[in-house]
Image (tube, helix red, strand yellow):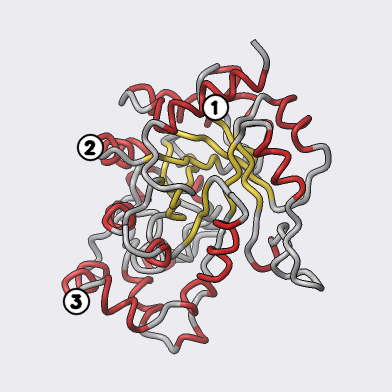
């Protein structure tokens, strides 16, 4: 069997769960509306009709996979208040118990209370009508209650096991180079029987080779903020099933910010023609979402899953 036929078989298992084409992929959950990478963000993304939820995994100091995006935990928690004077705030500086003692929700409400231009960039795009329509006062009170927590991977997957949604787990390894992270993530996936609904991506493509060595059937995706040459040959070489190009701000490799505004889609077309998926990250502008839909992308990641229209 060829590399591409094996890839087609793996993707077919995911396709059986697809509702919309292209895939509506909620980036870190519905993070424009709800504190990112929390169970609340995942639940909101499902309510808004997402087909897949993308989230990130690091390892705690005691070796547990945890759902956090940044290498450090200071942006999205009260860690500096809870643990003042630390020399660094890497995720791997804290045990799972310490990480789960943090308030992972109040910061989001604090951001929403700022003038739009002072917020984190993705929240500057949030319209007042979206917030009032999709987030209740009860939810806002919950987010600032101090009770929203960073989930472990085990907790996140247990939540997803009760749903039918697809899952994109991004392995975050650079610069910490967590030993054994791929094995630990795969073990957690298999423990809950979620293999047919999971795609594993990473900017560290060596991790994708490790995943493939550990499991011949796991779907993998090359995540990049660079333009790659001989892309289908590269995907063949590491037996990857999907390509995730950046299209956001300084990470735009598709051409939204190009001099003439023309999308550069030859490499995308080649990957699609090889039978693989191309899922763009992270698109929050409705007109750009429409352009990617017209271009035939397999999936589109967004911080605003409500902007795809009704589920």
Give residue 82's quadrant in the image.
Answer: bottom left
Closer to the camera: disc 1 or disc 3?
3
Q: Residue at x 71, y 31 (%)?
A: 235
Q: Quadrant of the C terminus?
A: bottom left
The residue depicted at 57 percent of the width and 36 percent of the height is: 178
Residue 63's quadrant in the figure? top left
Residue picked out by circle 2: 162
Give the Cα distance between marks 2 and 3. 26 Å
Q: Position of residue 229 (x, y in %)?
A: 83, 42
Out of 227 and 2, give the one closest to the viewer.
2
Secondary structure category for the residue under label 1? loop
The span from disc 1 to disc 3 (Cα, nearest Å) is: 42 Å
Q: Nearer the viewer, mark 2 or mark 3?
A: 2
Are dots 1 and 3 in contact, CB under 8 Å? no
Can you name the residue that lies furthest to the left here?
Answer: 138
Q: Compare marks 1 and 2 and give the one earlier in the sequence.
A: 2
Residue 5, x across and y down, in percent: 61, 19
* Residue at image location 61% in from the left, 34% down from the top: 276
Residue 117 x/y as whole percent: 52, 86
Classify the position of the N terminus by image quarter.
Answer: top right
Q: Mark 3 sits on what residue?
A: 137
- Asked whether the beta carbons under mark 2 and mark 3 sit within 8 Å of each other, the answer is no
Q: Which mark is residue 180?
A: 1
Q: Nearer the viewer, residue 138 or 66?
A: 138
Q: Is residue 295 left or right of residue 62?
A: right
Image position of 29 with respect to 290: above or below? above
For the point 72% across and 26% down, which residue is it? 236
Examine the rendering and report whether any part of residue 245 can be seen.
Answer: yes
């Amino acid at each position: 069997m060829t590399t591409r036929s094996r890839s087609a078989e793996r993707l077919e298992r995911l396709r059986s769960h697809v509702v919309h084409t292209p895939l509506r992929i909620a980036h870190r959950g519905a993070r424009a509306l709800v504190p990112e990478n929390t169970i609340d963000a995942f639940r909101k993304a499902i309510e808004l009709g997402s087909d897949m939820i993308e989230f990130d995994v690091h390892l705690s100091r005691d070796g547990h996979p945890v759902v956090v995006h940044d290498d450090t935990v200071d942006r999205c928690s009260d860690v500096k208040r809870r643990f003042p004077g630390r020399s660094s705030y890497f995720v791997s500086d804290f045990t799972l118990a310490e990480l789960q003692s943090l308030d992972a929700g109040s910061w989001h409400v604090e951001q929403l209370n700022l003038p739009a231009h002072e917020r984190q960039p993705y929240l500057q795009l949030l319209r007042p009508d979206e917030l009032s329509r999709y987030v209740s006062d009860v939810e806002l009170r919950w987010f600032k209650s101090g009770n929203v927590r960073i989930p472990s991977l085990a907790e996140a997957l247990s939540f997803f096991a009760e749903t039918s949604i697809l899952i994109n787990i991004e392995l975050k390894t650079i610069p910490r180079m967590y030993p054994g992270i791929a094995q630990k993530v795969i073990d957690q996936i298999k423990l809950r029987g979620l293999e047919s609904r999971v795609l594993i991506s990473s900017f560290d493509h060596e991790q994708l080779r490790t995943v493939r060595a550990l499991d011949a059937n796991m779907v993998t995706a090359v995540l990049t903020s660079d333009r790659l040459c001989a892309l289908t040959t590269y995907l063949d070489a590491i037996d990857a099933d999907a390509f995730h190009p950046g299209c956001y701000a300084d990470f735009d490799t598709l051409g939204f910010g190009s001099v003439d505004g023309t999308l550069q889609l030859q490499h995308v077309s080649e990957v699609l023609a090889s039978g693989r998926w191309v899922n763009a990250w992270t698109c929050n502008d409705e007109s750009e979402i429409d352009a990617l839909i017209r271009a035939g992308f397999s999936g589109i990641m967004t911080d605003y899953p409500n902007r795809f229209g009704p589920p």
